[in-house]
């Protein structure tokens, strides 16, 4: 879990106050990838605000006589999840097959990658993930991105990549471009991978202990699922949620009793996403309120997904087989739940 900040050419570098604010929230390592002499240079490894200020100055010295405003950059602040907090695991990373490049605190490459989220298929390979000596993003780069390096700029590959890893956000930088994969929030010409860049307060809710901890920010947050603005939100794994969406997550957790089932539900909950393109559920026709769940290619409301989970495999396969016309007829009939019988 991290905060990615991307800065395009022509946009001012963030103020020292903002940089310190973001580092205080994500203090497990910081780095910058920037366009440099026809390539991309990554300088990383700051583990304190003092080291971060030194790193920023080192970047400024590297690009001189250019000003930071004239250079595209990815700035990343890490919150350790897979891999222990240490300088070599600070993000971003160069796209390279070589472990020494990925670990280097100053390296030049053709592309560099910022990643916000958890790559679950790589995380599950890691024992004691928070203290591990490997990192999910590094393994993903070595296994997937580095062999495809000559194609990373293509829209087809980026679309496939974003759809497969739709619970993560990525920023990819070359010597002339920055690409955003997944939803980024724009403000003041900067792009952010989550809402924690805002100087606004929230409370953090811990479902295991049922405790709430008030954070230090000022103001109110917009829910990252439904978009509602609330003074108090509930923070789940890097997402800021309103009370209604928080209760949906609680329902998901309450359904899972055994550890393996909890793992499945935990992965499933990450598929809840803010949606700006589809206004109604593709099964029942109810308004999505900007929130949808992706299930076998269908965009569903939360109620329909919960109903589907109650069905057995045969009944679920029946729903998968419905044509668009059959779904339209069911919507027209005003159904508000998924029936178990065939259409």
Image: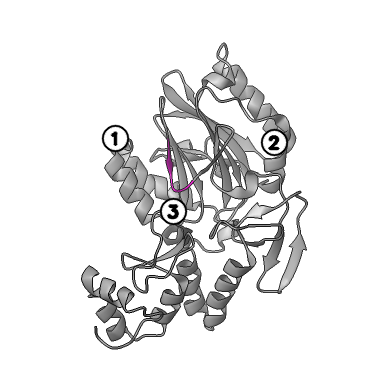
The residue indicated by pointer 1 is 150
Q: Residues within 10 Å of mark 1 (few under 14, many from 20)?
A: few
Place of residue 52 in the rendered image (x, y in percent of width and height, measured from the top left): 68, 33
Place of residue 13 in the rendered image (x, y in percent of width and height, measured from the top left): 61, 27
Quick check: is 13 in the magenta stretch?
no
Q: Quadrant of residue 264?
A: bottom left
The residues tagged by marks 2 and 1 sit, at their Cα atoms, a distance apart of 35 Å
Q: Residues within 10 Å of mark 3 (few under 14, many from 20)?
A: few
- In terms of secondary structure, where does tag 3 sit? loop
Q: Quadrant of residue 317?
A: bottom left
* Quarter containing the C terminus: bottom left
Q: What residue is rendered at 68% in x and 42% in y?
A: 23
From this view, report whether residue 255 is shown above or below residue 114: below
Mark drawn on residue 1? none
The residues tagged by marks 3 and 1 sit, at their Cα atoms, a distance apart of 32 Å
The residue indicated by pointer 3 is 276
Place of residue 58 in the rendered image (x, y in percent of width and height, measured from the top left): 62, 23
- In terms of secondary structure, where does tag 2 sit? helix
| Residue in the foreground of this view, choosing between 140 and 216 | 216
Earlier in the chain: of badge 3 and badge 1, it is 1
Q: What residue is rendered at 54% in x and 53% in y?
A: 133
Place of residue 196 in the rendered image (x, y in percent of width and height, measured from the top left): 64, 48
Quick check: is 182 in the magenta stretch?
yes
| Residue in the foreground of this view, choosing between 257 and 97 | 257
The residue indicated by pointer 2 is 18
Horizontal relation, residue 31 to residue 137: left or right:
right
Q: In the image, which residues are magenta?
A: 179-183
Q: Residues within 10 Å of mark 2 (few under 14, many from 20)?
A: few
């Amino acid at each position: 879990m991290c905060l990615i900040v991307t800065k395009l050419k022509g946009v001012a570098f963030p103020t020292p106050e903002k940089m310190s604010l973001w580092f205080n929230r994500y203090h497990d390592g910081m780095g910058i990838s920037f366009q440099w002499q026809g390539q991309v240079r990554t300088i990383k490894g700051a583990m304190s605000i003092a080291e971060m200020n030194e790193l920023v100055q080192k970047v400024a010295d590297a690009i001189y006589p250019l000003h930071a405003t004239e250079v595209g950059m990815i700035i990343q602040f890490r919150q350790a999840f897979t891999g222990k907090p240490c300088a070599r695991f600070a993000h971003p990373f160069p796209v390279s097959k070589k472990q020494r490049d990925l670990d280097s605190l100053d390296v030049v490459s053709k592309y560099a990658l910022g990643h916000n989220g958890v790559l679950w298929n790589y995380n599950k390979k890691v024992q004691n993930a928070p203290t591990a000596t490997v990192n999910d993003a590094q393994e993903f780069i070595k296994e997937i991105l580095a062999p495809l390096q000559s194609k990373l700029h293509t829209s087809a590959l980026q679309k496939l990549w974003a759809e497969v890893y739709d619970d993560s956000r990525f920023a990819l930088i070359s010597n002339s471009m920055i690409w955003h994969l997944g939803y980024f929030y724009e403000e003041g010409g900067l792009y952010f991978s989550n809402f924690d860049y805002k100087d606004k307060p929230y409370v953090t809710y811990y479902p295991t202990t049922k405790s709430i901890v008030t954070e230090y920010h000022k103001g109110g947050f917009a829910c990252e699922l439904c978009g509602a603005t609330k003074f108090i939100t509930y923070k789940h794994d890097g997402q800021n949620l309103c009370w209604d969406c928080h209760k949906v997550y609680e329902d998901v957790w309450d359904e899972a009793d055994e550890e393996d089932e909890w793992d499945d539900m935990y992965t499933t909950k990450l598929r809840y996403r803010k949606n700006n393109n589809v206004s109604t559920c593709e099964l029942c026709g109810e308004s999505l309120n900007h929130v949808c769940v992706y299930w076998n290619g269908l965009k569903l409301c939360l109620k329909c997904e919960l109903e589907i989970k109650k069905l057995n495999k045969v009944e679920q396969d029946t729903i998968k087989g419905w044509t668009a016309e059959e779904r339209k007829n069911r919507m027209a009939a005003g159904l508000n739940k998924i029936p178990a019988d065939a259409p």
